[in-house]
Image (cartoon, rainbow, N blue to C red):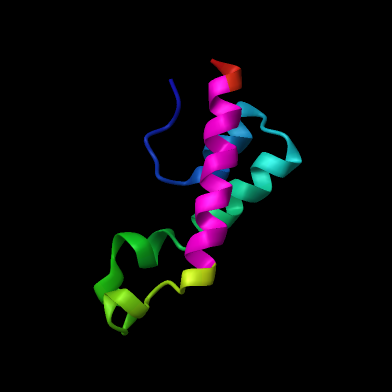
């Protein structure tokens, strides 16, 4: 069983993901705290993640989901 964690990088290492997917997991993990706890960022939640960063995260998440679908 995988560890109970939200650490995407750790989960990726446990699965032995390739570098491109590992980079995508790092990208997504970089904003985890801000996305999950926007009030802790010290800025209004709508300003916590920029539109540019949100777009990059969306693209990374889509690539990760494609990888998962192939692995299943």
The image shows residue 66, relative to residue 28, as above or below, that is above
Where is residue 18, by image quadrant?
top right
Task: Please name the residue shown 42% across and 58% down the image.
Answer: 32
Residue 71, percent from left and from top: 59, 19
Residue 59, percent from left and from top: 56, 50
Q: Nearer the viewer, residue 21 or 4?
A: 21
How would you classify the magenta stretch by its main secondary structure? Answer: helix
The image shows residue 56, relative to residue 9, as above or below, that is below
Q: Residue furthest top?
A: 72
Task: Please name the residue shown 42% across and 72% down the image.
Answer: 49
Left or right of 69 on screen, residue 36: left
Q: Is residue 11 magenta?
A: no
Left or right of 56 on screen, residue 54: left
Residue 58, percent from left and from top: 50, 52
- Per the rendered image, the range of residues in magenta is 53-69
Q: Nearer the viewer, residue 37 or 71?
A: 71
Q: Is residue 54 magenta?
A: yes
Task: Please name the residue shown 60% across and 29% down the image.
Answer: 67
């Amino acid at each position: 069983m995988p560890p109970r964690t939200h650490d995407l990088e750790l989960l990726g290492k446990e699965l032995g993901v390739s570098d491109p997917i590992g980079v995508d997991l790092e990208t997504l993990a970089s904003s985890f705290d801000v996305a999950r706890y926007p009030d802790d960022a010290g800025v209004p939640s709508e300003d916590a993640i920029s539109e540019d960063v949100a777009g990059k995260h969306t693209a990374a998440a889509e690539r990760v989901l494609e990888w998962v679908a192939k692995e299943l």
